[in-house]
Amino acid sequence: MSSAAALCPQALTSATRSVWGNLQSCQVHMGIPLGAGRFGEGSGIARLSTELGFCGFLGCTFRRAAGEQNGFKERSRKRGLATSASGNFDRRRPVEVSRRDSSRNAPSGERRQQRTKFRDDISPHRAVVVVRLLRIEEGGAYADILSWDSTIDTTREMQYVQRTLGFSTAELEPRGRRLVTEEVAGIVRWKRYLDYLIFSQFRGEERDYERMEPLLRQILRLGVYELVMLEMSPYAVVNEATQLAKIALRAGAGGMVNGLLRAVATNQIENNHPSPVLEGDDRSQARALATIHSHPVWMVRKWMARFGKEETIELLQYNNRRPTFALRANIAQGVSPEDLSAQLDKLEVAHEKSPYVPEFVRLSIGMQDVLRAGLLKDGLCAVQDESAGLVVCVVDPQPGEHIIDCCAAPGGKALFLAAKLNGTGKVLAVDINEGRLRILEEAAEQLGVSNIVSTLCCDLRNYTADVTGTADKVLLDAPCSGLGVLAKRADLRWRRTPEEILGLNDLQDQLLDSAAKLVKPGGVLVYSTCSIEPAENHERVAAFIDGHPEFVIESAEAFIPKELVSEEGYFASKPHKHLIDGAFAARLRKTQ
């Protein structure tokens, strides 16, 4: 679909196409990136449209030739649907007829003021949730990045709300920010199941639901999630969702939301929700499990073939649970795990020691408290999963060694490697992304290891054309599907495809061949991923060994707990078994 079609679902007229072409030219000359969809990080087309005075959803509904939509406007008026002066649905305006009619004749500045009025009848967290969901699904934003950004700058988040919905709300309080993070992750995680419940009450065909306006669909998902998963008060949920649909869209949308959510609320009270029947052949059962546990069907089929039905259900359930997080004590600054634990006790943040990596502590709640207290900013600790720490343990960095971390950004493993060198030795962090390397450099300064860590921005495959055999140890944390971290990365399950994994295998092979050139004779190469897929792990190592007989496998058992070591000697964690992210690491010794 073209960008124009994605931005404006109605058929483009010749006048519209002319405007679209002019917008593109203006964007280029003004240095604003061309948007690839309705939303983007600072969507160029949305910003430009706002500057030029275009009305409609995100400023991306184009003005039509005069008189072209008179019949459409008249039909919409009789049906009680708010339309703009151009004949398009005006999703920003309140839908009362008197306000709509009076605003049509108001000056443009006054109309803009009406569209962005303050609403105290909409909870700010609900407004933020639907806008953030739109940014994820329509614009490709990442849920975890949006969550992190909001802890730093809530003002920008509220500006997105105003531009998208056409009104402002009260500022988010700390409790509201926590609720936004929980609801966005939960709705993205349970999207397939929520859609199943919505469609069970939807009066229309499946294709009609698929064509539903994105904002309306997100409002429905939010309402169903709050009713079914959070068991909130039906009155509050239905009332606010209805109001939100009326104000941000139109009266008819509010009526539809009201009726559908009332039906779901009744089923919730009576414990009478529909559910797919788990019967038939493996294909049918995989489809049912995919809906019940909200995963892509292809993913469920793949795991059922490998793990069997019961273990697959355990994995699906783990991926849908509230994720736990881990903090790594910054031993480079003399902070012991006991020191970190004492700091968390002062904040009254519940935590426990990691059973796998001594420098780590686990916590399931309280991350916002940790951020606000400045423990990360002051360099006392870093957020890092235990599985990443275990990969560093497999590398086994020793003081004085020269270590290269390939594909290093954003740098969690490189920084832990540097901390373990105890002030002597070097870590070279190589990555192709200059912006992410800058983040790594800032973190190294913050954690007190900038004298140990240096960075190099380049393609590893080009770098090894001129540099060989320089490192005592090399870590290749290869780009992968990330199917081991679905509990934390709620949106990742919907972004991956089987074809993408096959494409990644070729890249992984190329990078592994290049990384091998950097290892000294007698040195160590560690290949790791955050995937649980054999095609990205065991099979890549087997293919590498076949082509590089100078490397032999060393068991990881000498470096990490035995329960995490596979029969082949690899580190291989399973999320549902070990209660950490799924990850893999193979330790390979260069013999000559």
Image (cartoon, rainbow, N blue to C red):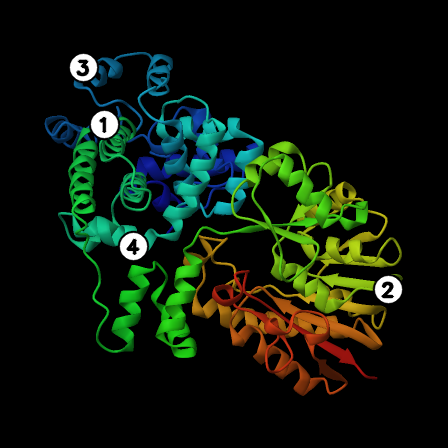
Residue type at numbered disc 1: Thr
x and y percentages locating residue 147 in the rendered image: 51, 40
Q: Is residue 466 visible?
A: no
Q: In 3D space, how far apart are the residues under numbered discs 4 and 3 (Cα atoms)?
A: 40 Å
Q: In this picture, is 285 found above or below 209?
A: below
Q: CA distance from mark 2 to mark 3?
A: 76 Å
Whether residue 405 is visible here, answered yes or no, is yes
Label 2, residues with CA under 10 Å away: few <14, some 14-19, many ≥20: some
Q: Which mark is residue 98?
A: 3
Residue visible at 68% across and 75% down in the picture: 557
In the rendered view, would you say 290 is above or below 119? Answer: below
Foreground: disc 2 or disc 1: 2
Pointer 1 residue? 83
Q: In the rendered view, does 569 fall on the left or right side of 467?
A: left
Residue 126: horizontal and vertical position, in percent?
A: 36, 33
Q: What kind of element bears circle 4?
A: helix
Q: Nearer the viewer, mark 4 or mark 3?
A: 4
Nearer-N-terminus badge (4/3): 3
Q: Residues within 10 Å of mark 3 (few under 14, many from 20)?
A: few
SS for callout 3: helix
Query: Of the residues under marks 1 and 3, which one precedes in the sequence?
Result: 1
Pointer 4 or 1: first along the chain:
1
User: In x, y percent, where is residue 48?
Assistant: 47, 31
Tell me if label 2 and label 1 are in contact, CB under 8 Å: no
Q: Report which residue position mark 2 lands on.
A: 401
Few, some or many residues within 10 Å of mark 4 (<14, 14–19, 20+):
many
**Labels 2 and 1: the sequence-earlier one:** 1
Residue tagged 4: 193
Give, as a three-letter code, the residue at label 2.
Glu
User: Which residue type does callout 4 highlight?
Assistant: Tyr
Q: Secondary structure at mark 2?
A: loop
Quarter where residue 176 is shown: top left
